[in-house]
Image: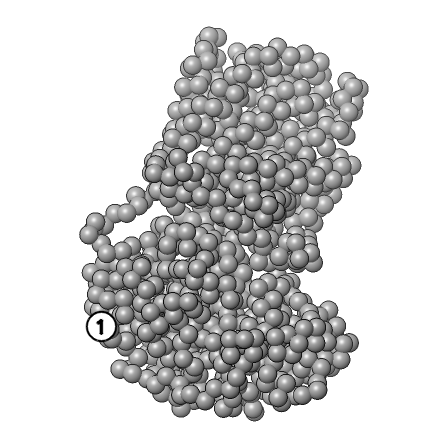
């Protein structure tokens, strides 16, 4: 697997530019044929294993909610919702090299889809689980539609132009909601009815824990779906298109279609994240999906490790917990009200900036790459574990040649590649 | 680093599981256990010598410039109160969290206050769109949600939201009073409205139409807080020939509207909700031109903000002593009045206040407050003030003109000539 050794320097050659690392790496089209053959056999075995691992990790996550107090469970739910979006984003960037700065808008599409459907169903007298499931489906459909439209444009654009289009979407969101305020209720947003803890569980768990469970389950379902997509033929095609579009076309891969599919899939998970946020907070408003938040999603992906689901999860923890930690820390200091006020608004932004620089400079593979090797090296190298590492490294089946430190396991739905 | 070729599934699963467990344990390590403290505690946030309450305020963001001084004033009043023995021997700790006037942030900071800081009650959460986002949450969790800093009628739904009480005169009443005043003083002139794109604007419009008749406004314009440009709206009002312009705007947008009109060379009579009608705050936005631009500006108030008033004197003194002599304006009076009303409610709730106890005390209708019109709290009303007094600006001084209206409960207002609430015991409530 010489391609692996070829690809490694490519990864380390672009360390400080975390974002650039996502764009197609230099051509390594030679061994493409081998990699196309490889996953056939993998797939057969990996799907059941993927499901088992996803199930186990989901149960662990649900078990963990028992250790947390209500506010921590609320944060956990936020992390799970954010994870939906970052998982989609990390695979979009990692697998196809399409950089989206607009994932917050896609989350908002899911959130509004969820809220409007839930309200319509409430008026129609539907509630409980059917209302949730139908609304969630509507959220996924709304974000899929928006993602599809965006993806159609995205497939024709590259680099900064693509980022620009997705950026516009986020910037336009507040204006859009206020122009159509009859439906979207402007800045105030849409409020939905409250979903309580089901009767059976009411004695055991608090509402925040219940919400965390729902968030975890939704994240599990959608991220597992993403992982399956990545491991399957679709993921392989995406990598092929990312690495050399011309070579991929020669192989019979329809590059445009693959890109649109990737964008749509990524949008669906973002929409699911938005729906979960709406479920947890019982409202959706443009103020929740600002440009800053959209960029923060990207920060999460880069800090965690581009292309890795575990990295997306770690990144989600960072962006949800860090502002809170900073605020708690500044609150503990004995500052004047004025100084504290100025710090709480600006310090998280500063810390995120510094963190981003430090992480990309020190560990281009993200936090994920710094985790103890022993724990993860037992596992197979990951497909798309490091997007910059080239396609063949990613799908390489030969573990003996893999001195990679960044192969990883995801905490929530994951895959085992063989 | 090569590995043994045999990697069984269980081992990998174990590795994955332990990775996840490690992460989650790390997360739970930074959690603080809920409950805690003395099990004999009367209620969350209440100890033998303190009562901890919290609020969400726009300390940053589009509404900050008009309102960030409110919580500082409330804090100053509590400092004064604590120095004078507190309430039933307990000092009041007031936790102020910034939500940037963004409903999404409000949800987070209020959950933090309730679940992490375990406050006894939320006091004076500011903003219609922001507080709407936590209305359900606070009522589901049975947290007293007292004296919301907004005139939305949403807070006055005792059946649906038994834990929520408003503070401002509601926007419907306020709009009815202004419409009545316009009808009396500017009869025959074309009336228009610029309103915020949420319940604030909706309810204000409802009040105006209650008095002036449905569809009687020549133009109704709306703005969104996230877009700081109202040229289109003001231009449309000018084109529609509006002579009396009603504003359901926050302070920043009142100033923006009047300033934009001046730039367009458009003169009209401006009348604003008390939420966006504080002269000192507006003058801060408009600068040197303020006295000229705001001459004749009409707004309402229901609190004793007038030079020479005994409450006003006391609050000025507290502002000097406990608030570093910050600029004294309508927001200062508002913030301190909120503090006073909470202290009164807490005193009425007895020696061992509970969450239910303080809500019962307010709903009993026994609170007096410090308003120009009587408090309307009762078992079937969670609205604080159902009346307002008209103020105008003359040569840079905003003062009452002796016209006060109260709601007649039937889509209109009637004149009111009762007395304002007198100052008692130096503004330190006793039970």
Q: Residue B284, relative to residue A392: is it above or below?
A: below
Q: Residues within 10 Å of mark 1 (few under 14, many from 20)?
A: few
Secondary structure of the residue carrying tag 1 is loop
Residue A300: horizontal and vertical position, in percent? 53, 40
How does the figure colour the protein chain or chains? one colour
Residue A110: horizontal and vertical position, in percent? 61, 42
At 72% from the left and 40% from the top, the residue drawn is A150
> Looking at this view, is A224 or B202 the one in front?
B202
Q: Residue B290, relative to residue A331: is it above or below?
A: below
Q: Residue B49, relative to residue A417: is it above or below?
A: below
At 47% from the left and 86% from the top, the residue drawn is B416
At 31% from the left and 59% from the top, the residue drawn is B356
Mark 1 belongs to chain: B
Q: Residue A341, relative to residue B234: is it above or below?
A: above
Report which residue position mark 1 lands on.
B85
Residue A2: horizontal and vertical position, in percent? 63, 15
Q: Quarter of the image holding residue B364? A: bottom left
Residue B418: horizontal and vertical position, in percent? 42, 87
At 62% from the left and 24% from the top, the residue drawn is A229
Q: Quarter of the image holding residue A21? A: top right
């Amino acid at each position: 697997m010489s391609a692996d050794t070829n690809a490694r320097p490519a990864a380390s050659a672009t360390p400080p530019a975390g974002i650039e690392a996502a764009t197609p790496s230099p051509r390594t089209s030679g061994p493409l044929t081998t990699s196309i053959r490889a996953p056939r056999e993998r797939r057969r075995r990996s799907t059941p294993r993927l499901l088992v691992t996803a199930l186990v990790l989901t149960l662990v996550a649900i078990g963990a909610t028992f250790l947390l107090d209500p506010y921590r469970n609320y944060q956990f739910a936020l992390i799970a919702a954010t994870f939906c979006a970052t998982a989609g984003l990390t695979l979009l960037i990692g697998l196809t090299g399409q950089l989206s700065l607009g994932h917050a808008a896609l989350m908002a599409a899911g959130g509004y889809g969820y809220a409007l459907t839930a309200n319509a169903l409430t008026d129609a007298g539907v509630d409980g689980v059917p209302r949730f499931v139908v609304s969630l489906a509507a959220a996924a459909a709304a974000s899929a539609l928006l993602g599809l439209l965006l993806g159609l444009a995205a497939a024709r654009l590259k680099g900064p132009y693509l980022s620009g289009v997705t950026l516009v979407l986020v910037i336009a969101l507040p204006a859009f909601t206020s122009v159509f305020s009859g439906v979207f209720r402007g800045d105030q947003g849409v409020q939905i009815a409250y979903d309580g803890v089901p009767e059976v569980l009411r004695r055991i768990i608090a509402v925040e824990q219940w919400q965390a469970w729902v968030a975890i389950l939704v994240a599990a379902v959608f991220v597992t779906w993403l992982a399956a997509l990545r491991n399957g033929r679709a993921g392989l095609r995406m990598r092929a298109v990312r690495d050399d579009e011309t070579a991929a076309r020669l192989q019979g891969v329809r590059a445009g279609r693959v890109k649109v599919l990737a964008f749509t899939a990524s949008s669906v998970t973002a929409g699911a994240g938005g729906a979960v946020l709406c479920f947890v907070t019982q409202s959706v408003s443009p103020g929740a999906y600002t440009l800053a938040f959209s960029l923060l999603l990207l920060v999460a992906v880069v800090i965690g490790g581009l292309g890795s689901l575990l990295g997306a999860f770690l990144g989600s923890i960072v962006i949800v917990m860090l502002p809170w930690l900073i605020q708690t820390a500044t609150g503990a200091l004995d500052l004047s009200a004025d100084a504290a006020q100025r710090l709480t608004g600006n310090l998280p932004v500063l810390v995120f900036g510094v963190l981003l620089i430090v992480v990309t400079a020190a560990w281009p593979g993200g936090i994920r790459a710094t985790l103890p090797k022993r724990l993860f090296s037992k596992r197979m190298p990951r497909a798309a574990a490091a997007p910059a590492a080239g396609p063949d490294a990613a799908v390489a089946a030969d573990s003996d040649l893999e001195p990679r430190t960044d192969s990883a396991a995801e905490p929530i739905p994951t895959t085992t590649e063989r | 680093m090569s590995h043994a070729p045999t990697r069984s599934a269980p081992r990998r699963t174990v590795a994955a599981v332990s990775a996840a467990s490690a992460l989650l344990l790390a997360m739970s390590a930074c959690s603080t256990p809920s409950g805690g403290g003395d099990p004999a505690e009367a209620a969350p946030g209440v100890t033998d010598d303190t009562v901890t309450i919290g609020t969400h305020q726009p300390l940053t963001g589009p509404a900050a410039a008009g309102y960030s001084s409110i919580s500082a004033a409330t804090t100053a009043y509590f400092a004064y109160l604590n120095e004078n023995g507190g309430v039933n021997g307990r000092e009041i700790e007031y936790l102020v969290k910034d939500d940037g006037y963004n409903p999404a942030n409000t949800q987070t900071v209020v959950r933090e206050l309730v679940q992490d800081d375990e406050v006894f009650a939320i006091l004076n959460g500011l903003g219609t769109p922001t507080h709407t986002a936590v209305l359900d949450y606070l009522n589901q969790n049975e947290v007293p949600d007292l004296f919301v800093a907004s005139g939305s009628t949403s807070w006055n739904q005792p059946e649906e939201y038994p834990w929520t009480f408003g503070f401002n005169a509601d926007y419907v009443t306020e709009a009815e009073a202004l419409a009545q005043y316009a009808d009396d003083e500017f009869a025959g002139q074309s009336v228009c409205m610029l309103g915020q794109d949420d319940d604030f604007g909706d309810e204000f419009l409802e009040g105006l139409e209650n008095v002036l008749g449905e569809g009687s406004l020549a133009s109704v314009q709306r703005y969104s807080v996230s877009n700081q440009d109202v040229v289109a709206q003001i231009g449309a009002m000018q084109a529609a020939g509006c002579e009396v312009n009603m504003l359901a705007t926050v302070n920043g947008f009142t100033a923006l509207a009047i300033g934009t009109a001046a730039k367009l060379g458009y003169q009209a009579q401006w009348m604003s909700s008390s939420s966006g009608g504080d002269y000192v705050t507006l003058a801060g936005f408009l600068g040197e031109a303020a006295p000229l631009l705001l001459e004749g500006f009409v707004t309402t108030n229901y609190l004793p903000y007038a030079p020479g008033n005994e409450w006003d004197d006391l609050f000025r003194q507290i502002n000097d002593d406990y608030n570093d002599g910050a600029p004294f304006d309508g927001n200062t009076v508002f913030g301190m009045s909120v503090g006073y009303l909470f202290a009164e409610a807490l005193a009425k709730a007895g020696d061992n206040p509970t969450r239910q106890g303080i809500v019962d005390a307010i709903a009993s209708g026994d609170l007096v407050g410090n308003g120009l019109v009587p408090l309307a709290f009762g078992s079937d009303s969670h609205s604080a003030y159902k009346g307002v007094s008209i103020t105008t600006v003359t040569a840079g001084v905003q003062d009452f003109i002796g016209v006060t209206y109260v709601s007649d409960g039937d889509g209109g207002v009637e004149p009111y000539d009762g007395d304002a609430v007198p100052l008692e015991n130096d503004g330190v409530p006793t039970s």
